[in-house]
Amino acid sequence: MMDVRSFAVIATVVFGIGVYGALARRHAIAVIIAIELMLNAAVLNFVSFSRLAAPGSAVSGQVFAVFIITVAAAEAIVALALVLALHRALKTARLDRFNMLKW
Amino acid sequence: MGETLFLDLKDFALAVAAALLPGGLLASVSALISAGAVLVVAPVTMMFLTWVERKGVGRFQDRYGPNRVGPFGVLQPIADGIKMILKEDIIPDGSDRLLHNIMPVLAAAPVFLLFLVLPFGRGMVAADLNVGVLFFLCISSMQSPMIISAGLGARSKYSVLGSMRAVVQVLSYEIPMVIVIVAVVMTAGSMSTSEIVAAQVRDGWFVLTPWGAFGFIVFLIAATAEANRSPFDMSEAESELVAGFHTEYSGFKFALFQMAEFLSAFASAGLAATLFLGGWQGPGFLPSWAWFGAKALGVYFVLVWFRATLPRFRIDQLLALAWKFLFPLSLLVVVAAAAWYFMPLLPALVTNLVLLVGGYGLLSSWILSEFIRMNAPRAVPDAR
Amino acid sequence: MLPADPRAVIAIAAVLAVLAMAVPLVFAKLVSPRNPGREKQRPYECGVVEAGDSWKQVRIQYYMYALVFLVFDVEVLFLYPWAVAFKEAGLIGLAEMFVFIGLLVVAWAYALKHRALEWE
Amino acid sequence: MPADIAFAMLGVMTIGGALVAVGAGNLYRAVLGLMLCLVGMAGLFLLQRADFLAVAQVLIYVGGVAVLIVFAVILTEREGEPLAAAVNPRMVPAALILGAGLTAVLVSVLWRSTPAESPVADVTARTLAEALLNRYLVPFEAVSLLLLAALVGALLIAKEKES
Amino acid sequence: MFPGILALVPALPFLAFVVIGLVTRPWRWLSAGVAIAAISVAFLLSLGALSFLLTAGAETPRVVELTWLTTSTLNAHIGLRLDALSGIMLVVVTTVALMVQIYSLGYMSEEPSLSRYYAYLSLFCASMLGLVLATNFLQLYVCWELVGVCSYLLIGFWYDRHAPAFAAKKAFVTTRFGDLGFLIGLIMICTAAGSFDFVEIQAKVAAGTWTAGWLGTVAVLLFCGAAGKSAQVPLHVWLPDAMEGPTPVSALIHAATMVAAGVYMVARLFFLFSASPDAMQVVAVIGGVTAIFAALIALVQDDIKRVLAYSTISQLGYMMLALGVGGMAAGMFHLFTHAFFKALLFLGAGSVIHATHTNNMWEMGGLRKKMPWTFWTFVAGSLALAGVAPFAGFFSKDAILHLVMGKNLFLFALAVLGSLCTAFYMTRVICVTFLGEARAASGHAHESPWVMRVPLVILAVLSVVAGFWHAGFERLVQGGEAEAEGLNLGFAAVTQMVPLAGILAGVMLYVLKSPDPDALAVRFAPLYTLLKRRFYVDELYDWIIDRIVLRCSAGLAWFDRHVVDGAVNGVAWLTQQTGTQLRYVQTGRVQHYALAVFGGAAILLAIAHVAGAF
């Protein structure tokens, strides 16, 4: 039961949930949480599939996973800073208020 | 003499289990025993610690400390425990009931996992992970979101402010601690605690090396701050912050937070002993686990000593100390450790002294000037 | 006596720890008296009547600290594998690390200069 | 057998945490859900003998990102704005279809594939270090640069402009 | 020896043109001198060439060739071909050119840009001589066009005035129509033959490589060019208007040489025409019709030069008729004689105009006593033209009539009627301008200076003498087998009646006025106006242009503006519209963009799934 496919399935489900969250949630930070979920699903996929890799290169799967974690952290930092700045400017954190780029 | 006491106990228990249960489960049974042993030892030590703490602080302040309940007040902790259980659990209205109930459990539970990686004695480590030290750090870093969520559970702005300040303090002191541990891992060559101790058995205690000494000092300061204790416990002592984030928790929930605090402090003390004081390594007349106990208690006593003597830091002084003093110093410790390894003894000694003493001098003078600047009379900052 | 698999120990310890906390809590809830009163329910204001639940605009400073912590936390995470392989990596590894730490120090200096770490 | 139980528990924990993270109206509960999901993921990594990653995941995500998110939520919480209006009703159907659709297709594909699993040596911190310092040196240095950039950017954006 | 020198004949006038153009432009008389010197040397050389031909025999054409342009498929040469035809034409062109240039000294004396005049004349002579000596189609065509250009320049010499400019344009455009046919024919024959050279093509035609029908079309196409240049019926409209140019020019170009180029071309390509009977038939019919048509119009013209112009068209019609019925020698002989007496008549008219400063005959009158030289030379020319016995015209016209009688009775009748009209309108001109009482313009008329009279006298002598050389001419042109049929005196006597009748009618009408011409004009009003308005040909062309050509171009313009431009603007409008519509996709909401991203990914996934990728 514990083979790669089941891990990949969990990752996909989490990814799907992340997609739903990113699209449906109204609050900016809820969307950021959803994006973190998606990134994490990717990390899980990397780790579970790195076991299938050729003997020598199993490590690159995990290296990539570490890099994704760092990128996700950096992304979270900047995204939240943006949300705070927008909040200070527009007095709200609701995504549908951020439509300054409207046609 | 009692060297392998606990190991023999475990084998005995295993033998009994093997007889009773089918073969397949043996591995998980042994895991169960190790985990169970740790989870039993932890609360016992917690109670003993509260006694040591209160007696110690009492003695420092030239008073007796608890001595009514049992000889020398030894049963005082049990009394406290029972009191906590019987106290009413008040949940303020407007607070998030779900958060208010589960937060104490989530805050206290990880602390027990800290003890899994500490090597109590020769061969007596519950979970010998090869990323042991990092495991310890990640579990201790897991506490900060729990603290802030606990504070949010109470929905009162003081508890939230208190928890945020506590978290900021914990975060600020975590970086120097983590960097100093890097130095230890570098020299030991592995992250697993048992190998670190083995390395110290081979090359002598790290605290005796110049970088080790400074590392130990940094680690100690950071550990006290991590546990929100003594000079750094402003988050629950300041007048307007009342009891910090666990103001709104009463009854057993409060007990859980107290337990978490004491145990994490003791775990840090244990880690300090493992990393810098050679863990269970000691001359033969005492069993290895006894040595570990003695060292851990010794470090813990120092923490109590801090608590009894040092006055409380203000939040801005405290953070300035972390970011302007400890952080650079820990980097210097790492550099010194690297130099220590690469250079032969004498030049290594010289460079280490120059690096560390020089660094220490510079940083403390910088911090001094910062404090003077901060305390200079100016408009009272509002309490945001 | 075979040492138990550390991962199993952690798993079991985690479950046990949560139980060890939850069970007494539930027990305490059953045992402890329960008579909620208006006064007791009010969040404790050290005697002063609570001045409204409004949130004061909490300053951005808190976010700065968390932000800087996260950046250094990630950088230190990368320090650990190097530390483990410090002895094998030799001087080249050290040089690579110095570059890494150098950039880390630059980040720290920037944060300091822009008074992100100042409590005010 | 015990591993399967652990896998099931962790699986439930992860997916449950994800659902809470996305579904919860109250953002604080959402962050808790996220933490639960992340810890579950760490558990899954441990199951796959990827210790360093599990520890890294917890250390950075739970210890750092979650705290950051909570701080951001506190800082942006406003009196008037009820958190309850969490979901944008117009987007829900589309999001549901997309999320569920993507998952369904991918899962069906995964289910039909039969990857051959080869026993692979454990990736310890040492092998990871060796890879990082030799083969992946450039990304390794780039990470530090990335974080510097992120720090500078975030500070500039978040800092109140002293006008 | 001979061919090399021959190259000088066309080269000298060309050299004169260059020298006048670049060097002696500011000095009028110097330029005139250079031009006349060049043409006189050329004249002497031509005489030498002719005598060489007469002595050494003209059977084998001497050819000198210079490769001008070689491409992978064709190689073009510039060459000189001396045989009977070119020999005669050389003499004709150079003599008339010399006479005209000498005459111009007097006629154009007050003209400020005299050097420009002489430059054009020299260029014309050079190109005409080049055309005559051409060995291949390419050189023929190049010179053909050069001659056209020179005629344009000379007709429009007084370019500041509207009439000459318009006439020059009209001449050029009309001849272009003809040249179009000529070019197409040229291309067809040359590509088919794979070479420009007459000799090769002649050999191929003789070898019968092409069908008569195909050759017929080529011949007719080539004849279009000739018709254009020699002002045959459909394309004759430009010649009467070309009279706007200075009279010496008319004399040289529109009487003797250029217009004869068409006839010479047909003669040079006679092997081609004779190969297809229906082509010959076309040439003959066109020639005949032109003859009678132009003659009728000439009856009622008032302007002395226009009468002569229509007379030229009519005589050219005769030459084409002669060639059409196969009499290459007769046609060429008529061209030979016609060049002299028509040049004489034009120069005579020129001196009359020079004296009276008007073109209209009815303003002149009674010039007999005032300008005796001009009068007598003019009478000699007219008699030659009418074909009265001893004069040159009689021999050449009689030969033609004799030939046509044998071939086609209807055309013979036309020819006879034509010669009757010729005689009548010439006597009309003489009576109106010279006899009778002096009218307004001839008050202060006086005889023209000797420099104009000398050429008149020389040409008069030639008009009289040229006729007698007809046998030698025929032997030269036909080569060897001279018809030796000589002059059929009986037939000649009969045909002599026609011109005499014409002259008699002319004298009765205009001297004795027994049936008063004006009364006649009134009685036959419709016929008279029809002739006066030149059969409304110009009006017909205008109508064609206005109704058909402009109407189609208007349609095409509409099509271009609406359909072509419409399409282009349509595309621009389309892009602009899609742009504005697509703008609304940018809602500014990040989640809409995320929806698009994931939607796209899902679609791609679905496609890949359907396509069986996994």
Image (cartoon, coloured by chain):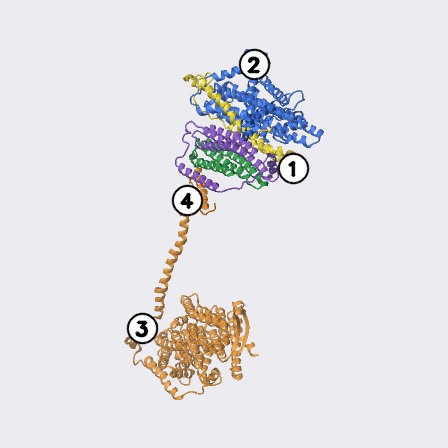
Chain colours: A green, B blue, C yellow, D purple, E orange
Residue holding disc 4: E582
Q: Give the secondary structure at mark 1.
A: helix
Q: Nearer the viewer, mark 4 or mark 3?
A: 4
Measure the alpha-carbon separation of dots 2 and 4.
Answer: 80 Å
Q: Nearer the viewer, mark 2 or mark 4?
A: 2
Mark 4 nearby-residue class (10 Å; few <14, some 14–19, many ≥20): few
List x then y, in percent, for residue E392: 43, 83
Q: Is residue E380 left or right of residue B108?
A: left
Disc 1: which chain? C
Residue holding disc 3: E529
Discs 4 and 3 lie in a common subunit: yes
Mark 2 nearby-residue class (10 Å; few <14, some 14–19, many ≥20): some
Q: Give the secondary structure at mark 3.
A: helix
Circle 2/circle 3 CB separation < 8 Å: no
The quadrant holding residue A26 is top left
List x then y, in percent, for residue A21: 44, 35
Mark 3 nearby-residue class (10 Å; few <14, some 14–19, many ≥20): some
Mark on residue C92?
Answer: 1
User: Which comes sooner in the sequence, label 4 or label 3?
Assistant: 3
Measure the alpha-carbon separation of dots 2 and 1.
Answer: 57 Å
Residue holding disc 2: B74
- Whether residue D32 can be seen here: yes
List x then y, in percent, for residue E212: 43, 76
Disc 2: which chain? B
Q: Nearer the viewer, mark 2 or mark 3?
A: 2
Q: Nearer the viewer, mark 3 or mark 1?
A: 1
Discs 3 and 1 lie in a common subunit: no
Measure the alpha-carbon separation of dots 2 and 3.
Answer: 155 Å
Disc 4: which chain? E
Measure the alpha-carbon separation of dots 4 and 3.
Answer: 75 Å
Q: Amino acid at mark 3?
A: Thr
Disc 3: which chain? E
